[in-house]
Image (tube, rainbow, N blue to C red):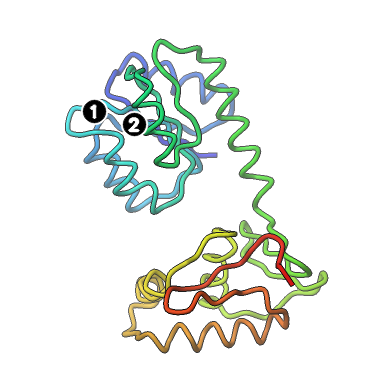
Amino acid sequence: MDILLVEDNKAISKGLEYSLSKNDYHCIVKHDVINATSFLRNNKVDLIILDISLPDGNGFDLYQSVISELEIPTIFLTAKDSEDDVVLGLELGAEDYITKPFSTKELIARVNKILLRKKKNFIVQVCDISFDLDKMEVYKSGKPIPLTSLELKILALLFSNLNKVVTRNYILEKIWEWTGNDVNDNTVTVYMKRIRQKLGLDIIITIKGIGYRIDEVKTL
């Protein structure tokens, strides 16, 4: 699995890169916000270890502006150990917050725990519908559902955000990003209708005027 380490202290980054590689992780190191941002715009990683005090910016800002949208599990690794900073990091959505000085063994253990949980979550099941997010395949009672590539991507947004509303505007933005075609509000309605028909189960909840949501356990 690929891990992005954003750390300006070269001694720490070299040590962690070595330790992560010994645990069969591929570690990519960036030393500042601009290079980390550029990398994330063009590459996928499984987890990020992120310092807060960086030469050209702030790790909190990088998380809010880029990482949170990409929904990549993140561990803040920083010398900022005040209670307010710890609370802020966790409230922003980070998986963990570790203060320096730190135990490399403990950090690796936390990385292992997060990535193991993520691996288990690749297959998501709601009622009789299971979605293998790794293979991008959808099944109903064990039988494959013939969704188009775009329908799969739209449904993946909902399955990746169980119990959360995915807004119509966000879906529209993603459709434009994936296809490069002009889209309008009716486009989302059309695709949702097609997806619902193919699923044959009413697991997609419409939040009128906002978007759509799938719950882990559908309330009857």
User: Please, is residue 133 above or below residue 108 in the view?
Assistant: below
Q: Which mark is residue 119?
A: none
Q: Secondary structure at mark 1?
A: strand
Residue 58 at what x, y percent from top left?
Answer: 24, 33
Return the residue found at the far left. Answer: 56
Q: Amino acid at mark 1?
A: Leu
User: Residue 174's image quarter?
Assistant: bottom left
Residue 32: quadrant of the picture: top left
73 to 52, vertically: above or below? below
Whether label 2 touches label 1, CB < 8 Å: yes
Q: Locate residue 172, reporting x and y percent.
A: 38, 76
Which element is circle 2 on?
Answer: strand
Please name the residue shown 39% across and 77% down the image.
Answer: 179
Would you say 140 lies left or right of 13 here?
right
Amino acid under disc 2: Val
Q: Is residue 27 left or right of residue 124?
A: left
Q: Quadrant of the N terminus?
A: top right
Tell me if residue 170 comes above or below residue 57 in the rendering. Answer: below
Find residue 60 and report its image quarter: top left
Where is residue 93 drawn, in percent x and y? Answer: 44, 42
Query: In the rendered image, which residue does mark 1 sit on?
Result: 54
The C terminus - image quarter:
bottom right
- The circle on residue 6 is 2
Q: Nearer the viewer, residue 213 or 32?
A: 213
Name the residue: 51% across, 74% down: 207
Q: x, y (%) of residue 19?
A: 51, 19
Question: With 81 as the anchor, is 33 left or right in this view?
Answer: left
Q: Residues within 10 Å of mark 1 (few under 14, many from 20)?
A: some
